[in-house]
Image (tube, grey):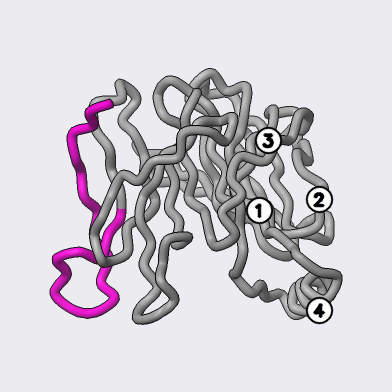
Amino acid sequence: DIYIQDLETGAERPLVAAPGYDAEATVSPVGDRVVFTSTRSGDIELWTCDLDGGALHQVTDTLGYDGGAFFSHDGSRLVFRATEFSSEEEKADYKETLALDQVRPGKMELYVIDADGSNRQQVTQLGEASFAPYFHPSDEKILFSSNHTWSGSGPINFDLYMIGVDGEGLERVTFDEDFDCFPMFSHDGRYLAFASNRGNNKRGETNVFIAEWRD
């Protein structure tokens, strides 16, 4: 379930609650809606609500894990990652696993969709696991993490990449041998925060890094 806390009093209350999975909540920069991932419809879909948890609206209705969404800076669109199926067997496996309240991460591509659920468009077609998308301050590009250049040997490596919302102009942003993911821009676009396993004290440790952004 998703909770909200009063920063002055520390009081907490449920914002969104239902049987199953309600998580991955982010707030629109406009300050009017929350997007979150939920199993309340039977599949893993995107939903939005107002800041009091009311006015629930289902955004996606396509088979697969639709999640990890962020709003564009004007609140009109969402970017998210979705399961990509290449066969009916993969769809059947997904349904069987979901019935056990589990998912098997695998092929994921990025999509954009209007906040009301219309105009769903695929952005990436990289064939591996692309996720953790975030809009560039211009809202015309998307920063995300992917393992699509991994050689297939050694530990799976994720780096940050940038791509236009039209799927054009893919470019690599980080070149580290360790895990780089979960990028977020400051609102003025000057800084980039991201998670990385680089320079850690022990294997698997993830820390947050901040870098100046230069287009």
Residue 96 marker = 4
Instruction: Tell whether label 4 touches label 2 (CB within 8 Å).
Output: no
Q: Secondary structure at mark 3?
A: strand
Amino acid at dot 3: Cys
Q: Residues within 10 Å of mark 4 (few under 14, many from 20)?
A: few
Q: Is residue 51 visible?
A: no
Query: What's drawn in magenta, residue-wise?
Result: 195-215
Report how far apart the C-alphas of labels 3 and 4 lie in the structure.
29 Å
Give the labeled residue for mark 2: 62
Q: Residue at x 61, y 58 (%)?
A: 108
Instruction: Tell whether label 4 touches label 1 (CB within 8 Å).
Output: no
Report how far apart the C-alphas of labels 1 and 4 lie in the structure.
18 Å
Amino acid at dot 4: Glu
Amino acid at dot 2: Thr
Instruction: Tell whether label 2 touches label 1 (CB within 8 Å).
Output: yes
Give the quarter of the image for residue 203.
Answer: bottom left
Report how far apart the C-alphas of labels 1 and 2 lie in the structure.
9 Å
Q: Secondary structure at mark 4?
A: helix
Give the labeled residue for mark 3: 49
- In percent of width and height, residue 161 lies at 39, 45
Give the labeled residue for mark 1: 82
- In percent of width and height, residue 39 lies at 74, 59
Q: Residue at x 81, y 72 (%)?
A: 95
Disc nearer the start of the sequence (2/4): 2
Q: Residue at x 55, y 52 (%)?
A: 24
